[in-house]
Amino acid sequence: MDEGPPGHPVRRPATVHSLDARRTRRNRWILAAAAAAVVPGVALGGWALGQQSAQQDQQVIAQEQQRQERLLAAPDVEVQRVQMDGGAATIFASRDRDAALLVASDFPDPGEGKQYQLWLLEDGTPVPDVTFDGGQSDVWASGDLAGVQAMAVTVEPAGGSEHPTTDPLMVADL
């Protein structure tokens, strides 16, 4: 320290350094490090979810294949091919397995706000079953086949109807 007159130190102006600049630089590094740690974690999490979804899809496909194989292996399986305007259906049915599968091929688009509906005919009375869209579809009958003599398909409002609102496009005896 320089001295002025004897016994009095020389005062120099103080140099002020902004702590904000240091804090800002330090905060940027902390944020960059945090982002570098988080981004791979998010990416890895997204990848893991994608893998899990793919595995679930594969399991669903495998279960569907097993279900179809059980039906096709039934000793009493009946197979029918039914033509309709613009498409065709192949029906596989087994009372032994209490299962019926309609494989729709090239069903035309049923129209805006419409879907196809499967009906199970018990003593001539249509019992509503599942709905499906045009194109290619594998449609499993969801009802009990014990009293079912036939299956039919109609075009209905989206979501289906309690009673058919149109004439059947196809009917297949079981």
Image (cartoon, helix red, strand yellow):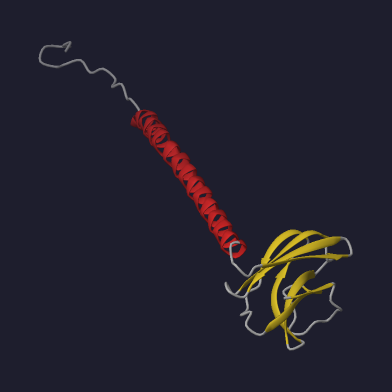
Q: Quadrant of the N terminus?
A: top left
Query: Which quarter of the picture shows residue 135?
Result: bottom right
Image coordinates of residue 116 in percent, x first then y, are 77, 70
Q: Residue furthest front?
A: 75
Identify the residue at horizontal 62%, vertical 82% (top origin). Answer: 146
Image coordinates of residue 129 in percent, x first then y, are 69, 77
Toward the viewer: 105 or 50?
105
Query: Which quarter of the picture shows residue 28?
Result: top left
Side of 59 where 170 appears, left or right = right
Q: Relative to residue 115, is residue 13 depicted above or below?
A: above
Identify the residue at horizontal 60%, vertical 67% (top origin). Answer: 75
Q: Residue furthest right?
A: 85
Identify the residue at horizontal 75%, vertical 62% (top origin). Answer: 104
Q: Relative to residue 171, is residue 108 depicted above or below?
A: above
Toward the viewer: 84 or 9?
84
Q: Relative to residue 170, is residue 45 depicted above or below?
A: above
Side of 16 where 49 appears, left or right = right
Image coordinates of residue 173 in percent, x first then y, are 76, 76
